């Protein structure tokens, strides 16, 4: 079996046993990766948005961003 075919088999969830002289030497299996879930509200009560959050920024502050 070619290595690329071995990887295709493993990718589909098939475990592959590698043997030498008829004796099992290694087991190749797919790594199970957990997909992280989005956790809404994780910062609830830990962050505070100031009252003037949407207020216009001062001109001198804006000019620092716009000079480049």
Image (tube, rainbow, N blue to C red):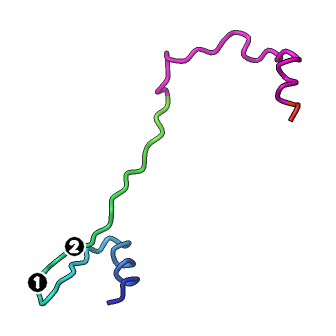
Query: Total marks drawn?
Result: 2
Give whichever of 59, 12 is nearer the camera.
59
Percent position (x, y) of residue 13? 32, 70
Res. 36 mark: none
Quadrant holding the C terminus? top right
Number of residues whose C-alpha sits closer than 10 Å to that of mark 1, classed few (under 14), some (14–19) or many (20 or more): few
Q: Is residue 48 above or below residue 18?
A: above
Q: Secondary structure at mark 1?
A: strand
- Residue 23 on the magenta segment: no
Main SS of the magenta part reads: loop
Percent position (x, y) of residue 19? 17, 84
Q: Secondary structure at mark 2?
A: strand
- Indicate left or right for 56 with 11 as reference: right
Quadrant holding the N terminus? bottom left
Q: Is residue 22 above or below residue 53?
A: below
* Outermost residue toward the top in this view: 51
- Indicate left or right for 68 with 13 as reference: right
Percent position (x, y) of residue 21? 12, 90
At horizontal 33% and vertical 74% (from top left) the residue drawn is 10
At horizontal 88% and vertical 24% (from top left) the residue drawn is 63
Q: Which residue is mark 2?
A: 27
Q: Which residues are magenta?
A: 41-65
- Residue 59 on the magenta segment: yes
- Indicate left or right for 21 with 58 as reference: left
At horizontal 38% and vertical 84% (from top left) the residue drawn is 5
Res. 23 mark: 1
Percent position (x, y) of residue 34? 37, 51
At horizontal 82% and vertical 29% (from top left) the residue drawn is 65
Give whichever of 53, 64 is nearer the camera.
64
CA gap, disc 2 and disc 1: 12 Å
Give the quarter of the image for residue 31.
bottom left
Give whichever of 42, 58 is nearer the camera.
58
């Amino acid at each position: 079996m070619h290595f690329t075919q071995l990887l295709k088999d493993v990718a589909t969830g098939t475990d592959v046993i590698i043997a030498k002289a008829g004796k099992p030497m290694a087991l190749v299996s797919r790594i199970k990766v957990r997909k992280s879930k989005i956790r809404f509200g994780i910062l609830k009560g830990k962050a505070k948005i100031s009252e003037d959050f949407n207020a216009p920024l001062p001109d001198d502050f804006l000019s620092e961003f716009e000079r480049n």
